[in-house]
Image (cartoon, grey):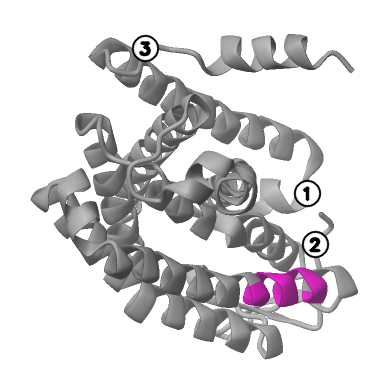
Amino acid sequence: MNRPNDEATSKSIFAWNYFLWEVRLALVTIGFFFYLGIFCFSHFLSSWLSITYRSLSAKEKVFWNLAATRGVFGVQSCVAGFWALLLDPVFQADKVYSQQDWSWFSCLVAAGFFLLENVAVHVSNFIFKTFDLFVVVHHFLAFGGFLGLITNIKSGHYIPLMGMLLEMSTPFTCMSWILLKAGRANTFLWKASQWIMIHMFHCRMMLTYHMWWVCLSNWNAVMENLGFLYFTVLLTGLSAVTFVLNPYWTYKKTLQLSSPVDWNFSDRTMKNGSSVKVNGETFQKKGL
């Protein structure tokens, strides 16, 4: 194993001049279009392979592709977040001011993802005449936090990376939802995915407590580092996730384990692996 070559490759991937606006905005744009590409790829692949997908309404297809896109982002977030939490010595030594080239890259790409999420949510709400307050607030605060990171180049990256790690549940949310739509709610795979997802939501709660500990134990340093406005956005978002969103979503996902209902499209329920209309009209079990 040639470690000098590996280190040179690593530096060539992440070594950008992040103090330049054009570099930061370019990486946000790359993140936006990369995840937009995942969204479109999910649509074309699912249209080709999935009977279930082809039978869904337009609104459900959008949600399906957003779920797949969030799942991919969840994988990226887990890699970056766990690396900062458990392995990177720089972040272990300093949780307030630390920055790394790789963390700049990850956070700016994540900002592009959250920009896409906000655009997708608002366009979808406008087209389909819907409005989910919790989802809108969640995405607005997430993008607001990463927007502060873009504008304040001296802010540390540990807390934003922990915010990314909160997405650890999304790959399993994606898997559970797609299996549910395919009428597989009675299978071991769906139940296992649901159990892991619920566990990830409990882990999210523990992670928010860790983020509070970092903020409270370094209060003055964090405020000085972030600036008052960004610090306010951080505390608002962290409070919303800790006291409202995480408990609510954990409750709903736990309830869903014993009652497999697609809460996003409540005119349908899943019973014994089949999709059933609430008004009594029954559909056949779909193949994935």
Instruction: State if disc 2 and disc 1 touch (CB < 8 Å).
Output: yes
Quarter in which the N terminus is drawn: top right
Alpha-carbon span between mark 3 and mark 1: 47 Å
Q: Nearer the viewer, residue 257 or 184?
A: 257
Q: Is residue 133 visible?
A: no
Q: Can you give x and y, in whole percent of width and height, for residue 195 in the image?
A: 73, 77
Q: Which residue is mark 1?
A: 51
Above or below, 286 against 242 in this view is: above
Q: Can you give x and y, in whole percent of width and height, for residue 205 in the image?
A: 49, 75
Label 3 element class: loop
Q: Which residue is mark 3?
A: 17
Tell me the kind of residue under disc 3.
Asn
Q: Is residue 163 visible?
A: yes
Label 1 element class: helix
**Marker disc for residue 217:** none
Look at 45% across and 30% down and name the residue there: 109
Quarter in which the C terminus is drawn: bottom right
197 is within the stretch colored magenta: yes
Q: Earlier in the sequence, mark 1 or mark 2?
A: 1
Report the number of discs.
3
Residues drawn in magenta: 191-199
The quadrant holding residue 26 is top left
**Marker disc for residue 286:** 2
Tell me the kind of residue under disc 2.
Lys
Q: Is residue 257 left or right of residue 61?
A: right
Look at 10% across and 52% down and name the residue there: 228
Kindly report which numbered mark, 2 or 3, lies closer to the viewer in this rendering: 3
Q: Secondary structure of the magenta portion, mostly? A: helix
Q: Is residue 279 left or right of residue 163?
A: right
Label 2 element class: loop
Alpha-carbon span between mark 1 and mark 2: 7 Å
